[in-house]
Image (cartoon, rainbow, N blue to C red):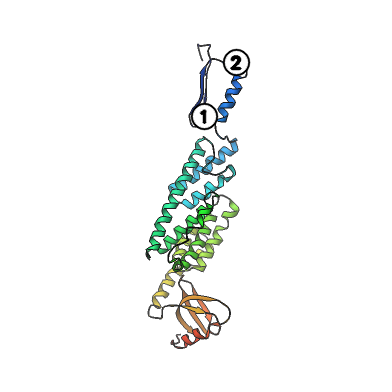
Amino acid sequence: MKGNSIPQLYVVRADGQQLYGGAGSLPGDALPQMLLAALSRAGRSFNPEQARFLAKTVDAADEAFDDQQYLTAGVLLAELKTFGSPGDLRSHAEPARRAEVLFSELRSEIDQAVVKARSAMTEGEAKNSFSHVLAICEAEAVLRLFPSWKADAASLKRDLPGAEAYEAHFEQAEALVKARLAAASPVSRIRNRAESLYTAVIRKYQGSPVSTFAREELERLNPEAQVLRMTSGVSSGVSKLVDKTDGLPGFRLWRASVGNFTTRAKYVQHNDGRVQLLKETGELIVVEINKLSDEDQKYLSTLENTD
């Protein structure tokens, strides 16, 4: 200290807590012993490269969390697995403490979303049913990212009354979440797969809510994606087709004459030995009539052929 021959010594941890404070020099081995004792309470340290990675990842996860992109936030926090669990990094460094807070808040948000979705589905709320299923599937994906949460993922759909009624929605939602996981990945090799995954969803579930989600997200990812040009106007076309079939028989189960293939779909029209069927997902398919079961062929014979 200037003007004073007596040294003042302080050891302060990264979070601001004072680990040592005293006046006067420490004799002999006292100084290194004090420093070792302080280090034992200082928490985990990171080398410069690790510190930069930690800060960058937590900043990105924090931003995603603020935007309520909880799946993206989870994917980013999962990248800290090289340091251990994001909820137990054992460091007093500011980015590490932020990671632990985010980890806790992420679980809270996921649990609340699941409770809300399960409640709506249990009560048979038809409105926005796909969004409820999507919330369940996204929560499941987040839980599977972390070893300490993974066991809870399997229970999300367990004991959910009427879950079979949402089977088609679950299939679609799981496909969309898979694409979202790829798009959120900080690893370029994985991220590059996102476009093909979104494309598969758009093509397979044309006209359905999940296709709309996939199109919007792919447009943000790559506005020049080929499937966006190829399927422009498809959604409105399918909607018109659904309107056109309003006066026709409703959805029923169709079976193949050989094998166990079945599909639930609505009759549209048949001619030239083929029948057009509109699936509940919005996908329009064409099936050879002679490949359908005898029961289905008899059913078609009761319907008027259309041109």
Q: Earlier in the sequence, mark 1 or mark 2?
A: 1
Residue under the point 58% across and 54% down: 190
| Disc 2 element | loop
Locate residue 217, reporting x and y percent. 48, 58
Name the kind of residue labelled 1 in the image: Arg
Viewer-nearest residue: 138 or 269: 138
Viewer-nearest residue: 85 or 98: 85
Locate residue 282, reporting x and y percent. 46, 71
Locate residue 5, reporting x and y percent. 53, 11
Instruction: Determine which of the numbered discs, if any, sits on residue 13 in the image.
Output: 1
Which marked residue is nearer to the observer: mark 1 or mark 2?
2
Name the kind of residue labelled 2 in the image: Pro
Q: Is residue 291 above or below residue 157?
A: below
Q: What is the residue that sits farthest to the front in this orientation?
A: 159
Residue under the point 43% across and 47% down: 66
Task: Answer whether residue 76 is visible to the viewer in this image.
Answer: yes
Locate residue 96, reporting x and y percent. 52, 39
Q: Residues within 10 Å of mark 2 (few under 14, many from 20)?
A: few
Q: What is the residue that sits farthest to the right in this orientation?
A: 29
Q: Residues within 10 Å of mark 1 (few under 14, many from 20)?
A: some
Instruction: Determine which of the numbered discs, if any, sits on residue 27 in the image.
Output: 2
Instruction: Determine which of the numbered discs, if any, sits on residue 161 in the image.
Output: none
Among the 4 quarters of the image, the one containing residue 129: bottom left
Q: Is residue 103 above or below residue 3?
A: below
Q: Is residue 76 above or below residue 288?
A: above
Residue under the point 59% across and 35% down: 48
